[in-house]
Image: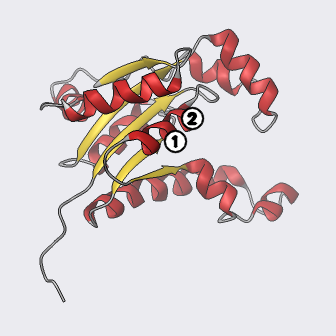
Amino acid sequence: MNDLSPTPGRIILLNGASSSGKSSLARAIQSRIDRPFWHISIDHLRDSGVLPAARLKSGEFDWREMREAFFLGFERSLLAYVAAGNDLVVEHIMESEAWLLRLADTLAGQDVFFVGVHCALEELERRERERGDRPIGDARRDFHRIHSYCLYDLEVDAMQDRESNADRVIAAWHARSKPMAFELLRERRVCGGARA
């Protein structure tokens, strides 16, 4: 058995509003990048049945009481995956600056390439209506806040072709250099620049 620790994996982290095209972009990156990347998201966990959905729906369990621990567990699991040597493309909605900074702290010392996925509000709302699996209004709520406190390594317009966006992300990821956005976010907070 090999006692050597694996080389840590890398993360391409996609942040965008609900229905902005993060999943489509993640799949395009995964299919085009030159290394095997896992595609990970909260939706994968939810859709796999890890949550007691029927008991949440019936009101027996209160999602509001479970929610914070669920998201914290998801975020900490990313560290375990990369520590084991797995490369990840992760989609996650940074609902608040506190969440963003918590994740930056959790992944301190890791290779995280942070990508902002932007989409016009009218298109977000159209996609949200078409999908039918999201509460109406989530896209509008996300649109007005989730990018305001972020600092990215790269930003893409999800109104553009997803394969072209994937190629842009992959090229920028290959050309990445330090300091990266997560390092700068932590520095900004230490220097007193983070908003409360």
Q: Which corner quadrant of the image does residue 136 belong to?
A: top right
Badge 2 vs badge 1, beta-carbon distance below 8 Å? yes
Q: Position of residue 28 (x, y in %)?
A: 49, 37
Number of residues whose C-alpha sits closer than 10 Å to that of mark 2, classed few (under 14), some (14–19) or many (20 or more): some
Instruction: Tell me the amino acid under the disc marked 1.
Output: Arg
Question: Looking at the rendering, in which quadrant would you find the C terminus?
Answer: top left
Name the residue located 19 percent from the left edge and 68 percent from the top edge. 6
Residue found at the far right of this picture: 58
Q: In this view, which residue lies farthest toward the bottom?
A: 1
Residue 54 coordinates in the image, percent (x, y): 83, 62
Describe the element under mark 1 as helix, strand or loop.
helix
The residue at 53%/19% (across/down) is 161
Going 81% across and 64% down the picture, which residue do you hit?
Answer: 55
Q: Identify the mark at residue 27; answer none if there is no mark.
A: 1
Instruction: State how far apart marks 2 and 1 are (Cα).
Output: 5 Å
| Residue placed under numbered mark 2 in the picture | 24
| Residue 92 percent location from the top left of the image | 49, 40
Question: Residue 51 lies in what quarter of the image?
Answer: bottom right
Is the residue 160 above or below the residue 111 in the image?
above
Residue 34 shown left or right of residue 49 in the figure:
left
Q: Which quadrant holds residue 193? A: top left
Q: Amino acid at mark 2?
A: Ser
Which of the two residues, 15 or 12, is positioned nearer the viewer here? 12
Q: Mark 1 packing: few (<14 Cα in 10 Å), some, or many (20+)?
A: some
Name above or below for residue 49 compared with residue 187.
Answer: below
Which residue is more in the foreground, 71 or 92? 92
In the picture, the quarter occupied by the N terminus is bottom left
**Residue 57 % position (x, y):** 83, 55
